[in-house]
Image (cartoon, grey):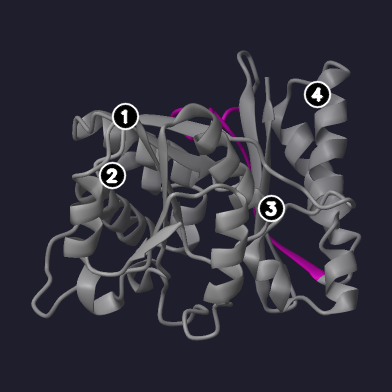
């Protein structure tokens, strides 16, 4: 497994690659959810590049940039075991040099859901992903379904800016107790970790209602709210039942929907979702 830090190093390596290149963008502190993306890329591409960059522009001043978990050596170990060919670890100064002032924005898809509470978040996400695409020049890029809105926003950016990239969205990987894997789970105490399972419990309960024939979005959202509120350590920020492509709220489900939510467990903000097919 090779490594690169500068853009020049990355491009020198990229220029020698023949065949299909798959990119897995990450912020590090990797877990099996990330590795599942690498393994998917490994199965479909000739060469796999993983980027590790904790992107400061997608964090608000009140968020956890300085305390975001990091363990680069452990990340390298996991990535080598998964068959990664190259790991790119640029610095803040490389990605945002002095005088940087160019941003990529996707208008409508970034307004609802996470956009209501993290208004600058997606501008940072789309800008850094566009920069990664521009430097790496992959034919395929791999993202996780846990960040469902992010996936929809990046797919829209790929279409709108004519990136010649096939985007692959891979399923959520869950712990044995169904908590969605996330780097932020490391913030949870033992009691909070147990309480956090309320997210998946509420989503799965709503999914069962859907399978039993319930199509009223309000009923499904109220079911989720009631279950989350039964957990004393949980504070529900939002619950949504939206069209999977437009991310606009629906009243009655006619052709599938995305059930998603954000919940604070203590000071840790967790997200989760499930697709109703």
Q: Nearer the viewer, mark 2 or mark 3?
A: 3
Residue 81 appears left or right of 211: left
* Magenta segment boundaries in residue numbering: 234-250
Give how far apart the Cα atoms at labels 1 and 2 are.
34 Å
- Between the C-alphas of marks 3 and 4, the distance is 29 Å
Residue at image x 85%, y 56%?
A: 198
Q: Label 4: which residue?
A: 210
Mark 3 or mark 4: whose residue is earlier in sequence? 3
Quarter-of-image position of residue 223: top right
Q: Secondary structure at mark 1?
A: loop
Q: Name the residue beneath numbered marker 1.
A: 19
Whether the magenta-drawn stretch holds residue 242 is answered as yes
What's the mark number on residue 232?
none
x and y, in percent, of residue 84 in the image: 50, 50
Above or below 203: residue 63? below
Q: Secondary structure at mark 4?
A: helix
The residue that label 2 is drawn on is: 107
Of circles 1 and 3, the one toward us is 1
């Amino acid at each position: 497994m090779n490594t690169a830090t500068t853009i020049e190093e990355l491009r020198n390596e990229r220029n020698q690659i023949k065949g299909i290149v798959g990119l897995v963008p990450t912020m590090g502190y990797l877990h099996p959810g990330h590795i599942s993306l690498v393994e998917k890329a490994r199965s479909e591409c000739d060469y796999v590049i993983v980027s590790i960059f904790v992107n400061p522009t997608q964090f608000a001043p009140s968020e956890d940039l300085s305390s975001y978990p990091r363990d680069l050596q452990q990340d390298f170990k996991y990535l080598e075991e998964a068959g990664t060919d190259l790991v790119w670890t640029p610095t803040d100064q490389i990605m945002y040099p002095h005088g940087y002032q160019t941003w990529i924005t996707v208008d409508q898809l970034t307004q609802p859901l996470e956009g209501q509470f993290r208004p600058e978040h997606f501008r940072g996400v789309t800008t850094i992903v566009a920069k990664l695409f521009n430097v790496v020049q992959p034919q395929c890029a791999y993202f996780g379904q846990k960040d469902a809105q992010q996936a929809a926003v990046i797919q829209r950016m790929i279409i709108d800016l004519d990136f010649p990239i096939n985007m692959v969205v891979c399923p959520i990987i869950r712990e044995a107790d169904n908590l969605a894997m996330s780097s932020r789970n490391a913030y949870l105490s033992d009691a909070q970790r147990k309480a956090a399972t309320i997210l998946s419990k509420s989503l799965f309960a709503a999914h069962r209602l859907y399978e039993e024939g319930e199509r009223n979005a309000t009923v499904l959202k109220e079911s989720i709210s009631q279950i989350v509120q039964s957990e004393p350590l949980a504070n529900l920020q939002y619950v949504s039942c939206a069209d999977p492509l437009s991310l606009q709220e629906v009243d009655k489900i006619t052709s599938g929907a995305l059930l998603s939510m954000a919940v604070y467990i203590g000071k840790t903000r967790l997200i989760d979702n499930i697709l109703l097919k």
